[in-house]
Amino acid sequence: MTAPALTRLHYPGNVLRETWIVFHRAMRLSLRNPMWSILMLSQPLMYLFLFGPLLKPITAQISQGTTTNAYQVFIPGLIVQLGMFGAMFVGFGLIAEYRAGVIEADRVTPASRIALMAGRVLRDVVVLVVQSILLLLAALPLGLRAPWDGVLLSLVVVALLGATFASLSYSVALITKSEDALAPLLNGIAMPLLLLSGILLPMQIGPTWLQRLSDISPLKHVVTGVRALFRGDISSSASLWGLFWVVLLTVIGLAVGARTFRKESA
């Protein structure tokens, strides 16, 4: 085996080290320019303070008598929204790196293509989890009460959703290599997901045809599962189905992202 061929081998230890290097660089860039993270957190905070109080008069209806805390219904949807949409648009940063020549420089290194993706995705997951914790802390003075184990599992769901949508966003960004193509595509996907997943209000209060339509969306089951976690129903069928779907989506998202990075960064 020749020396150049040896440089292409990627053992698990090397991949982890390379992932950490990419993560460290990406995190440094985020800390130097935190405006994007602040803007992504500002939207859920506005929903929390300006839309959340409107739910209190209809809490009994939307929760079907299972809780008197409106924020046990609303906050789970907000953190799922943060996990989805906070990661869905990270591909724009990758396009900027592509135009700056960063991706081209990555291609000539012996670094694992999986590490190039995983380091960036890990940065996005850390940012989303921190944002979710800040959102939960902001909701406590408003009356949010939830069991700690359910909240921790919900943060795991946010992390998995972030990994899923970040991987898919990077994948689409590498394929399109254009903000003009990426923006309408993501916006076209984001709106149906927002409306059919029951993020703002549970789909149970809608007409039957809308409930049946929303059942097609796996994210609706994820949102329902996180709401069950916030009620403390960790072993309920709703929470287990939600965890199943989020794990399945994560496997698919990471697989698609890894395949795209291997192909486009070859």
Image (cartoon, rainbow, N blue to C red):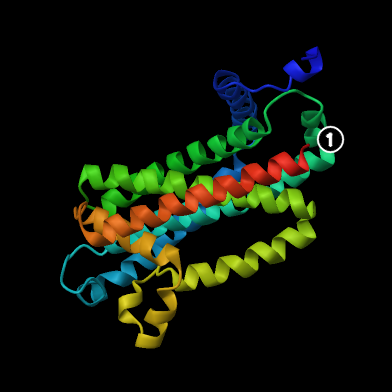
Residue topped by disc 1: 101
User: Which quarter of the picture shows residue 5?
Assistant: top right
Q: Position of residue 214 (x, y in %)?
A: 42, 75
User: Which quarter of the picture shows residue 97?
Assistant: top right
Asked whether residue 199 appears in the rendered view, the answer is: no
| Residue occupying the point 63% across, 42% down | 258
Q: Position of residue 187 (x, y in %)?
A: 64, 66
Crowd class of label 1 (few under 14; some 14 to 19; many from 20; radius 10 Å): few
Say whether residue 89 is left or right of residue 96. left
User: Which quarter of the picture shows residue 222?
Assistant: bottom left
| Residue occupying the point 82% across, 27% down | 108
What is the quadrant of the C terminus in the image? top right
Q: Position of residue 256 (x, y in %)?
A: 61, 49
What is the quadrant of the N terminus in the image? top right
Say whether residue 94 is left or right of residue 194. right
Asked whether residue 4 appears in the rendered view, the answer is: yes
On screen, residue 245 above or below 263: below
How many numbered badges does the structure rendering display? Answer: 1
**Residue placed furthest toward the top:** 3
**Residue placed furthest toward the front:** 1
On screen, residue 20 above or below 70: above
Q: Position of residue 128 (x, y in %)?
A: 48, 43
Say whether residue 99 is left or right of residue 227. right
> In what element is the residue under mark 1?
loop
**Of 246 and 37, the residue lying toward us:** 246
**Of 233 and 73, the residue lying toward us:** 233
Q: Amino acid at mark 1?
A: Gly
On screen, residue 98 above or below 58: above
